[in-house]
Image: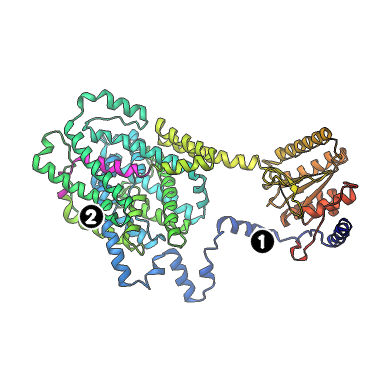
Amino acid sequence: MVGQQQVVDAAAAAAAAATMRVPVPPPKPLLRTIGGNLMETFFPDDPFRAVARESGGRRALAALRYVFPFLEWLPSYSLAALWSDVVAGVTIASLAVPQGISYAKLGDLPPIMGLYSSFVPPLVYAVMGSSRELAVGTTAVASLLFAATLGKEAPPGEKPELYAALAFTATFFAGVLQAGLGVLRLGFLVDLLSHAAIVGFMAGAATIVCLQQLKGMLGLAHFTTSTDVVAVVRSVVTQSHQWRWQSIVVGCCFLIFLLFARYISKRKPKWFLLSAMAPLASVIAGSVLVYLIHGDRHGIPVIGYLKKGINPPSARDLLLSSPHTMVALRTGIITGIIGLAEGIAIGRSFAMLKSYNVDGNKEMIAFGAMNIVGSCTSCYLTAGPFSRAAVNHNAGCKTPMSNAVMAVAVMLTLQFLTPLFHYTPLVVLSAIIISAMIGIIDYKAAVRLWKVDKIDFCVCVGTYLGVVFGDIQIGLAIAVGISILRILLFIARPKTTVLGKMPNSTNFRRMDQYTVAKAVPGLLVLRIDSPIYFANSGYLRERIMRWIDNEEDRIKAEGLESLKCVVLDMGAVASIDTSGTKMLEDLKKNLDRSSIQIALANPGSEIMRKLDKSNVLGLIGEEWIFLTVSEACYYAQQNCKIGVGMGVVQCVVDPEHMV
């Protein structure tokens, strides 16, 4: 009785399904279709929604708020928020001053330029930035890239003025690139750097930066300009007779102190100020020590004279039509992309902790604006380093105003305190850089990649090795190349899986995941997990035919009923092009020669529209297009005379799920 009732239910469902065919959507005007696709590509977040719903003068004000995010929080700014931002700004200034000097030395630029770069760009970001926690400034990776690429064109020891002009020009090009990507809504291009590639790249860059600091830690006067580990080790070993024990002792002492401060701050987050103030304390203590013992006369190199005053203009120094322009352009593009990828990722990670959103395109415009303005005011490339953002977050910042407070503190330092850095030992700056870079090497992320995805782990390791044994540009090329290759592989080699029927259910699931799912006799159900394009249509045709051959071999080996119908689950196929429709046409003809029917289940509106326009829909037959896999299987059993004496697939139709 139960079996008869199931057959009756299935027959009734089939009758209902006959009136619920998948419709072909009505045609859309071409311009409307193109406009919709462009909106989805460049404006998926509908950024102008807040502007569009206003009227009159309010619309203009909403547009200004979009361009200048500070207008959103400034009207409701309170004294309590100001106090929090002042505390955070002063705290990150205590880190920005020694870091700025250190990173400028790393980039073979005048130390004062590191302070310049912590004054003007933060003011611009305070007006245009949308992240509350990001504290902008110079970065070690960009500094090292400037030294490695621009230094070959204009050795800073021989041509310091040309080298500085190239640094300003590269910063200008980086800013133009960043702002252009933001204005044109091309932020998704930065996402070509996968998380695994970024982890490996940053770890490799941090390793190279640490190795470069052996020059200061060992007190060497000359050092290799190459960044690969082999050249650095060779330079250290061949100059072992020139190591200065004074620099080694002082450097190790301060490095141990900085690492201990970082360790305590991680163990007890309430003591974050210890880690934040440690670099400045090291600079002060090192300067006092060298001054008292006259260390500059006993083998401990010092910074020397730093001139007072705020940033001088540098717009006239930009080399926009020079034989060296292409080098600056290439350096600007590389450092600009790295700065964006790092800064936006950091800003979004902190935004998630406080449950608000950071607009990546706005951030690109803000980064671009601060680098364009910075290049005209004696600054070199600035981004959003993690160390400053972490200190800013832990110090309790409320708005980007903390960047403005930091800028004011740095300005006061430029105006009145620069002579105090005369006796700052270079070895202390090296210790500061090493302690900061050790925090960038995220070994926990690498371990997590190994556990979750071995391919991602290989991408991470490959990028790391490319940076360490090649150079930063090779490592970046490997990172981008592997990321693009993975995208192409996902597109060109999409997944196809066999589905089986779940017991006591109308659901079909992957048989390699659900061991209880069983194949339906005489049917082969395949799911395509990708859009069908010219890049993968040939592969899909061959892969589907291979699935069919494997199924027929299994049927012969087990003496089962011959294959009568192939059902393609199209639910994951978001789009299709003419190569895809041609593939389905060829597949239909091939299966016809073998007396095997083809059926499509759950095709989307775009799929139906293109199948109809290409006449493939008529070739397959509208009666073989179904809402669900279960309906397709039931219809095939009834019309292909499958499973006689074996029962049928029960098919339940829910009117609420009509396409």
Label 2: element kind:
loop
In the image, 573 versus 277, the foreground residue is: 277
User: What residue sits 11% from the left and 35% below the top?
Assistant: 297
Comparing 217 with 303, the one in front is 217
How far across and down, in percent of the image, does residue 467 sit? 42, 35
Q: Which coloring applies here?
A: rainbow
Q: How far apart are marks 1 and 2 (CA)?
A: 53 Å
Residue 426 visible at all: no
Numbered label attached to residue 604: none
Does residue 195 appear to the left or right of 511 in the view shown? left
Residue named by callout 2 = 310
In this rendering, the answer to whether 584 lies above or below 65 is above
Indicate which disc residue 32 carries: 1
**Within 10 angstroms of label 1, few (less than 14), some, or many (20 or more) residues?**
few
**In x, y percent, where is residue 24?**
78, 58
**Quarter-of-image position of residue 270:** bottom left
Start-end of magenta stretch: 419-440
The overriding secondary structure of the stretch rendered in magenta is helix
- Coordinates of residue 254 in the picture (x, y in percent): 22, 42
Above or below, 64 relative to 529: below
Residue at (54, 61) in percent of width and height:
45
Q: Sequence-wise, which precedes: disc 1 or disc 2?
A: 1
Q: Does the magenta stretch include residue 109?
A: no
Rendered location of residue 117, percent (x, y): 30, 51
Q: How crowded is mark 2: few (under 14 residues within 10 Å), some or many (20 or more)?
A: some
Q: Which of 266 and 627 is in front in this view?
A: 266
